[in-house]
Amino acid sequence: MKDKDLPEYWLRGKVEGTPDLLQPIVHSLLQSKLELKKYMLDFKESLLWEKPAGRASVGFHLQHLTGVLDRLFSYAEGLSLTEKQLEYLKIEAVPNSNVSSEMLIAEFDKKIEEILEKLKTIPVASFTEFRGVGRKQLPSSVIGLIFHAAEHTQRHIGQLLVTVSVVKEEN
């Protein structure tokens, strides 16, 4: 059975190996991965960095999806951001002719798979532990960070869909 014939991930049941409390997060991330590929079908590379109405480009959304997941899970693990992560953050919105949408989608897929493995190992007892976020070390719980990672990913998938639709229509 093909994905298009299946219900959305939240209606497909338990993803084995992941704590029950994290199932909605896993489903959300898997749905994001599926939808990204669907929305990017037949996308022209020449449109990757177009900014319709001055809004974020498809390229930004693709880079940001991977970068934000990486950063939020570092915080959830109680880690500070590395120089590499900070450099990636600086370039997310910068047009880069050395990358293709295919490369960016592959990076996102790889990051999702990495995150899904991490979700299998996070102790349920740590969900309510607080972590510092960002330079100001603002407080969030582990579960709050993980939930926000899934929610933020879905938000950018939706924004990417609109941007893809607009730039395709205009060109």
Image (tube, rainbow, N blue to C red):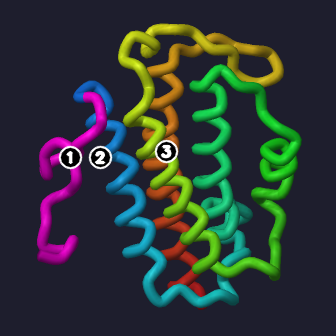
Q: Secondary structure under badge 2?
A: helix
Q: Nearer the viewer, residue 83 or 138?
A: 83
Q: How many badges with numbers are in the image?
A: 3
Q: Residue at x 58, y 44 (%)?
A: 69
Amino acid at circle 3: Ile
Disc on the earlier residue, 1 or 3? 1
- Rendered view: 167 above or below 124: below
Q: Nearer the viewer, residue 55 or 27?
A: 27
- Rendered view: 117 above or below 79: below
Q: Residue at x 48, y 53 (%)?
A: 112
In the picture of the structure, the residue carrying the numbered disc 1 is: 10
Which percent across, then down, holds residue 45? 65, 87
Which percent across, then down, holds residue 124? 36, 17
In this view, the mark in front (1 or 3): 3
Distance CA(mark 2)–CA(mark 3): 12 Å
Q: Residues within 10 Å of mark 3 (few under 14, many from 20)?
A: some
In the picture of the structure, the residue carrying the numbered disc 3 is: 115
- Rendered view: 95 above or below 63: below
Instruction: Give the magenta part as a residue range.
Output: 1-19
Disc on the earlier residue, 1 or 2? 1
